[in-house]
Amino acid sequence: MDHLTENNLTAKTLEYPVCSEWKENPEGSMFHLAHILLVLGFMGGSGFYGLLYMFSFLTLGFFCYSIWAWSDPCTTDSFSWTFALFAFCLAQVVHGSYRLRSVTFDKEFQDLYDYMFKKLGVSLTHFGKIVECCEGDIYTIDKDHCFAVEGKTSIDKLSVLISGRIRVTVNGEFLHYIYPFQFLDSPEWDSLRPSEEGVFQVTLRADNRCRYVAWRRKKLYLLFAQHRYIAKIFALLVRNDIAEKLFSLNDKAFDIRGFRYDLRLPSFCHGPETEIENTSVSQPVLGQSETKPAERDS
């Protein structure tokens, strides 16, 4: 009998307590507000700003939950857990805010990121390293001042025009314009190896007041060695810029009949033969054709 009574008592204690009656009043407003904030927090997306959004709402949600759990005098477990989660989310918000401060740029650098780097999927963190490489400096060229002079200015940096317009000439003859968010010296940069040195073969003169950003050659190659991803991004941007400059030159190239040249055709790259070459080739052929009838007569 003693074993039966003990088993019955243990079975009764293990049973889930049955609710005798429903509460007439719902939980307080702080309880419902906490769950609303938690739902909004879990709807946050990915990425840097998505994480900042998510942890901000989770911090507010767990804070409201901790206030509600504090009002329950029967247990301290709910309060302890919710307060610990509140502290963890708050630490994430502080860390994210610090990172956001480190990737906040001036307007001109922000425009540069939006126009050139954002469409390639470059993160703000990587762009911050690019800005650090140029030390965050923006340079100015006054009207009619030269950025480079053909045969004199050395190629020691890579530059992007932020505002204004640059005229490119060679031997005083106009070639093309450089507009904002285009490289000033992409052909020169791509023509040299890291260990080589050279000078500009064209003259770059400002049509109006211009502003540009420049990266020193050695510092930029050091950044490429540390971050191969950034090196690939710059290689893509530079070669795309060179292609745009070639097509801008192609728009001004016409043949005698007024048709535009096609860069893919070999005739555009190789000019016609000179008269001396034509005569030197044609004379032996004519000589052979004149001697053949004489040989037949003999």
Image (cartoon, helix red, strand yellow):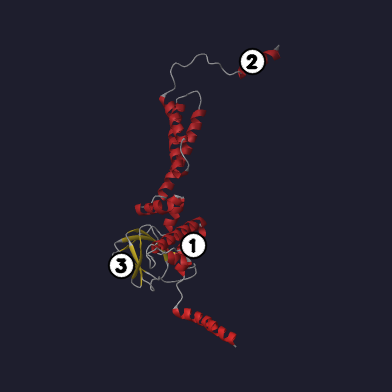
Q: Quadrant of residue 244?
A: bottom left
Which residue: 51% across, 32% down?
81
Residue for point 50% across, 55% down: 229
The type of residue carrying mark 1 is Leu
Q: Furthest residue to the top?
A: 1
Mark with earlier residue (3, 2):
2
Which residue lies under the disc numbered 2? 9
Q: Name the residue tied to disc 1.
A: 222
Residue type for callout 2: Leu
Looking at the image, is mark 2 or mark 1 earlier in the sequence?
A: 2
**How many residues crowd mark 2 within 10 Å: few (<14), some (14–19), many (20+)?**
few
Considering the image in quadrants, where does the C terminus appear?
A: bottom right
Residue 145, numbered label: 3
Q: Give the percent coordinates (x, y) of residue 112.
A: 39, 54
| Residue drawn at 41 percent across, 61 percent down | 247
Element type where label 3 sits in the image: loop
159 on left or right of 9: left
Measure the C-alpha gap from mark 2 to mark 1.
77 Å
Q: Are marks 3 and 2 in contact (CB under 8 Å)?
A: no
Local secondary structure at mark 2: helix
Residue 8 position in % (x across, y down): 65, 14
41 is higher (above) or lower (below) than 209: above
* Mark 3 and mark 2: Cα distance apart in space: 98 Å
Query: On the picture, is 200 further left or further right than 193?
Result: left
Q: Residues within 10 Å of mark 1 (few under 14, many from 20)?
A: few
Using the image as rendered, state which of residue 118 and residue 103 is in the foreground.
Answer: 118
On screen, residue 265 above or below 121: below
Query: Looking at this view, is 270 or 291 the one in front?
Result: 291
Helix, strand or loop at label 1? It is helix
